[in-house]
Image (cartoon, coloured by chain):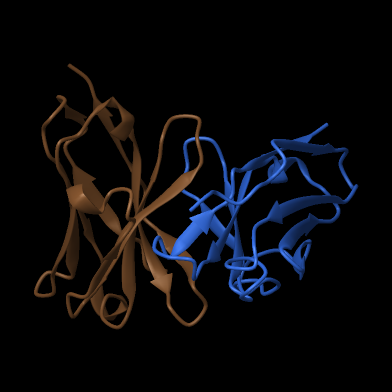
Amino acid sequence: QSALTQPASVSGSPGQSITISCTGTSSDVGGYNYVSWYQQHPGKAPTLMIYDVNNRPSGVSYRFSGSKSGNTASLTISGLQAEDEADYYCSSYTSSSTPLYVFGTGTKVTVL
Amino acid sequence: QVQPQQWGAGLLKPSETLSLTCAVQGESFSGYYWSWIRQAPGKGLEWIGEIIHSGGTSQNPSLKSRVTISVDTSKNQFSLKLSSVTAADTAVYYCARHQSGHNTFDIWGQGTMVTVSS
């Protein structure tokens, strides 16, 4: 099972909006609404930011939103802030075979 | 909020067995699947496997022959053993709670760095 494909890096200035893509197949991203996004600061454990494509856990800023079209999911961060600088990973349930869950290759977000 | 606590040996020699344990407080343990996920230095996340309090497990096929995941419900703990480790198993290992209804990992342990070196 291959990892989901994400851009290696995305950057933006404070206040701008950025979008990170996550491309899979019809067996994972395209087949289920079980896409999640995680934020990871250096040396820290990942934190759940989005689940079920577009749902935010309690406590996560409204500036984070998710969507999906076909086999590609997206995470948008609006009103970019310095604290948003981190690595972001998508993940999806997959039916192709175990492993049951696949992660994206990761995207480094830089706030200019 | 639930905060899993994990521990285990951080330095292993090739061919040894990696052993990690994750403890979860109170009622937050039962009824959930609990996973192990690892991250090699500078790399992405890799799902290793999961277990539920009843003992049912699933593993990543790429590691299945070397992975054992077990649970001790009396202590609200679950463990990972990875046999015959090599340098390729050097990574930060995380335990994480899996929300089965949403197929997402909503709570993560602090991570344990495991280095395999002769």
Residue B117 image-quadrant placement: top left
Residue shown at 48% from the left, 67% from the top: B106
Residue shown at 53% from the left, 49% from the top: A2
Q: Is residue B20 visible?
A: no
Location of the N terminus of chain B by quadrant is bottom left
- Please give left or right for residue A37 compared with residue B82 in the image: right
Who's brown, chain-wise? B
Residue shown at 21% from the left, 46% from the top: B7
- Expressed as whole percent of the image width and height from the top left, the position of residue B63 reads 28, 48
- Please give left or right for residue B26 compared with residue A18 in the image: left
For residue A80, above or below residue B43: below
For this orientation, the residue located farthest to the top is: B118
Location of the C terminus of chain B by quadrant is top left
Residue shown at 21% from the left, 75% from the top: B56
Front residue of A5/B54: it is: A5
- Expressed as whole percent of the image width and height from the top left, the position of residue A57 reads 60, 72
Residue B14 image-quadrant placement: top left
- Expressed as whole percent of the image width and height from the top left, the position of residue A13 reads 88, 38
Who's blue, chain-wise? A
